[in-house]
Amino acid sequence: MQTRRGFGIRFAAAIGGVVAMLLTAMPASQAADNVVVFAAASLKNALDAIDASWQQEGHQPATISYAASSALAKQIEGGAPADIFISADLDWMKYLSEKNLTKADTEVNLLGNRLVLIAAKDATADTTIAPSFPLADLLGGGKLAMADVKAVPAGKYGKAALEKLDVWSSVEDKVAQAENVRAALKLVATGEAPLGIVYQTDAVAEPEVKIIATFPEDTHAPIIYPAALTATSANEDAAKFLDYLKSDKARSLFEEQGFTVLVPAAAN
């Protein structure tokens, strides 16, 4: 069973690891030339594909660090060398914007997503998400995998949905909180938790899980991924990469992963 102290240690280590990786794992010349992107963990598959496409068009590879939006925002606040921040919710972008740590005129609501309930691919669990649905019974004594419900967007959305459905109190003591949504996904994929709450795009990216139900959109705030240049970015390619995220090519790659692209399509 995960203790609060144990979780806190792992969460702090994850936060510290973001900057440590960037500062120690990259050669100085690479760190100076490449666009550094701090992105929500749920974006990994899509952004890796977009970065590969970006490179095919003759650009240097982006250096992308994936973690919980909360951890990344705190690292940017602490001076981490990021050029672009992509959050999984509006709150953490607002957190940085209000501290003048983003270039406000570059902020854009880039993507949308859905929240789903998942189980292992061979599980027989089935349900319809509605007020007071029997989530605690479905767990069968196991844990419900979720991202940190106090700080990580996926966890916050999930808790809000369960509260709206009058289910949270029945499962609150059964939640296994993970440092980010991909870590919660892994708990279900490896059989450590029978059920989990993640984004639809995470479930699509993991062959060892399946979606058993989708949360109604009116049970939580809209899931919006904003992106922006950081206030300290001096990399000329950063604005180009941000524009590339809004291109038709990036749109197709985001949509392949199940995201809804919120920026208008380019005019033909």
Image (spheres, rainbow, N blue to C red):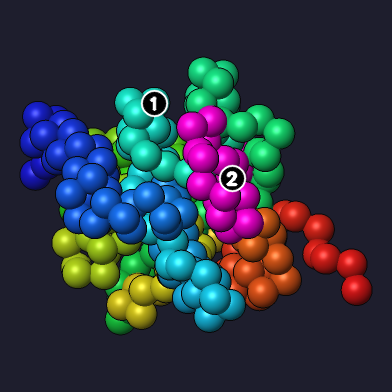
The local crowd at label 1, few if under 14, some if 14 to 19, many if 20 or more residues have their Cα within 10 Å, is some
Give whichever of 251, 29 is nearer the camera: 29
Task: In this rendered view, identify the residue nearer to me: 179 or 47.
Answer: 47
Taking the spot 44% from the left edge, 61% from the top edge, the residue there is 62
Does residue 219 appear in the picture of this structure? no
Q: Mark 2 and mark 1 in contact (Cβ < 8 Å)?
A: no
The residue at the point 15 percent across, 39 percent down is 13
Residue 230 among those drawn in magenta: yes
Asked if residue 231 shows in the view, the reply is: yes
Q: Residue at x 54, y 60 (%)?
A: 214
Which residue is under mark 2?
Answer: 227
Amino acid type for the residue under numbered disc 2: Ala
Specify whether residue 75 is painted magenta.
no
| Coordinates of residue 139 in the picture (x, y in percent) | 28, 56
- Mark 1 falls on what kind of element? helix
- Cα separation, mark 1 vs mark 2, equals 16 Å
Q: Along the line of sight, which residue is nearer the eye, 130 or 51?
A: 51
Q: Is residue 87 left or right of residue 268?
A: left
* Residue range highlighted in magenta: 219-241
Q: Position of residue 191 (x, y in %)?
A: 19, 68
**Looking at this rendering, what residue extends furthest in the right direction?**
268
To which residue does mark 1 refer? Answer: 77
Q: Earlier in the sequence, mark 1 or mark 2?
A: 1
Compared to residue 71, the image places residue 143 above or below, namely below
Dot 2, how many residues are within 10 Å of its Cα: few (below 14), some (14-19), or many (20+)?
many
- Three-letter amino acid code of the residue under disc 1: Glu
Q: Quadrant of the C terminus?
A: bottom right
Residue found at the very far top of the displayed protein: 99
Q: Is 218 on the left or on the right of 234, as rendered?
A: right
Where residue 82 sits, quadrant-wise, is top left
Q: Quadrant of residue 64?
A: bottom left
Within the image, what quadrant is residue 75 found in? top left
